[in-house]
């Protein structure tokens, strides 16, 4: 209204102030939720690595049973241990 050279109504000014205040509150909440989301994403990535290593360990263990090769069995144990390390890291991550 001021750009048109007219005086804004008092009710419009009050609504504008109310909306600005609400906008600041919403912005604060959104920033807090974005930070929380980043924490969850970090934890998710670590857990995804853990699950992947467990799945590979299971596949290698199955191959070791079929081929009766001890090396594959040891490799599956190592991969499973690495998966446990990532699982532990995700539990400690905040």
Image: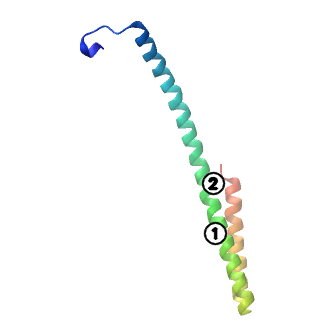
Depth order, front residue of 8/48: 8
In the picture, measured across the screen, residue 32 lies left or right of residue 74, that is: left
Q: Is residue 77 left or right of residue 24?
A: right
Q: Which residue is located at x 65 percent, y 71 percent?
A: 53
Query: In the structure shown, which secondary structural element does the residue marked by tag 1 occupy?
Result: helix
Q: Earlier in the sequence, mark 1 or mark 2?
A: 2
Where is 71 relative to 24, above or below? Answer: below
How is the rendered protein coloured? rainbow
Classify mark 2: residues with Cα within 10 Å, few (<14), some (14-19) or many (20+): some
Residue 83, quarter of the rendered image: bottom right
At horizontal 60% and vertical 48% (from top left) the residue drawn is 39
Disc 2 secondary structure class: helix
The residue nearer to you, when weighing 77 against 24, is 24
Residue occupying the point 57% across, 39% down: 33
- In this rendering, the answer to whether 51 lies above or below 4 is below
Q: Work out whether residue 93 or residue 41 is closer to the camera in this orientation and state it.
A: 41
Residue placed most toward the observer, 40 or 90: 40
Q: Which residue is mark 1?
A: 52
Label 1 vs label 2: CA separation?
14 Å
The residue drawn where x is 26% and y is 16% is 3
- Pointer 2: what residue? 43
Residue 20: x, y in percent?
45, 21
The spot of residue 64 in percent (x, y) is: 72, 87
* Among the 4 quarters of the image, the one containing residue 61: bottom right
Label annotation for residue 4: none
The N terminus: image quadrant: top left
Q: Quadrant of residue 51?
A: bottom right
């Amino acid at each position: 209204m001021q750009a048109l050279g007219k005086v804004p109504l008092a009710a419009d000014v009050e609504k504008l102030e109310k909306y600005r205040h609400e906008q600041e509150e919403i912005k604060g909440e959104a920033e807090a939720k974005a930070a929380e989301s980043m924490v969850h994403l970090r934890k998710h990535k670590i857990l995804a690595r853990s699950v992947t290593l467990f799945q590979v360990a299971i596949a290698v263990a199955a191959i070791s049973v079929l081929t009766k090769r001890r090396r594959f069995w040891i490799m599956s144990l190592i991969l499973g241990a690495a998966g446990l390390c990532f699982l532990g890291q995700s539990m400690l991550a905040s």
